[in-house]
Amino acid sequence: MVENGDIVAFNQLFTIIPKSIVAADLGTQNVRFTMLMNHIERFTLQELFLLGSFFELNEEEIVRLALNQYKEQKKAKSGNNNNTKS
């Protein structure tokens, strides 16, 4: 799904496997995992690489998805800041 462009951002992976299952496999609580999803920059590379292995993605693929997610979140946050200042 990543190869053919159906999934282009990190959080889209959880349409395949529920985040609660992935969080348990990662050894973290669902609340912390949700926080990390909402602040993708807080994941460690080790966590991202492990997550990539769950989805059979190599390091470059999972980092690319995380980077795309970061850009989406950054854009959304800057858009929200512009709306609150008006």
Image: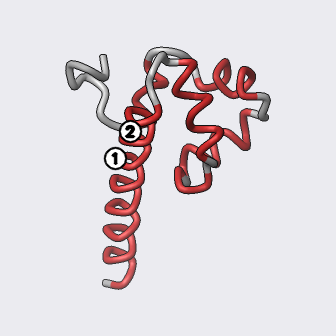
The residue that disc 1 covers is: 68
Q: Residue at x 31, y 23 (%)?
A: 2
Three-letter amino acid code at the position of disc 1 = Asn
The image position of residue 74, as x and y in percent, is 38, 62
Q: Nearer the viewer, residue 83 or 52?
A: 52
Whole-percent x, y for residue 48 in the image: 57, 38
Q: Residue at x 38, y 38 (%)?
A: 65
Q: Where is residue 40 in the image (x, y as percent from the top left)?
A: 53, 50
Dot 2 falls on a residue whose secondary structure is helix
Q: In this view, does 8 lie above or below 42?
A: above
x 31%, y 84%: residue: 86
Q: Residues within 10 Å of mark 1 (few under 14, many from 20)?
A: some
Task: Answer above or below: position of 85 versus 83.
Answer: below
User: Which mark is on residue 30?
Assistant: none
Q: Is mark 1 on a helix, strand or loop?
A: helix
Quadrant in the picture for residue 34? top right
- In the rendered structure, the answer to whether residue 75 lies left or right of residue 29 reads left
Quadrant occupied by the N terminus: top left
Residue 29 vs 74, above or below: the answer is: above
Q: Where is residue 75 in the image (x, y as percent from the top left)?
A: 32, 62
Dots 1, 2 in contact, CB < 8 A: yes
Residue situated in front as seen by the camera: 24 or 62 = 62
Tell me how the rendering is colored.
Answer: secondary structure
Q: Residue at x 78, y 34 (%)?
A: 29
| Quarter holding residue 8 | top left
Which label was assigned to residue 65? 2
Hey, what amino acid is under mark 2? Leu
Q: Residue furthest left?
A: 4
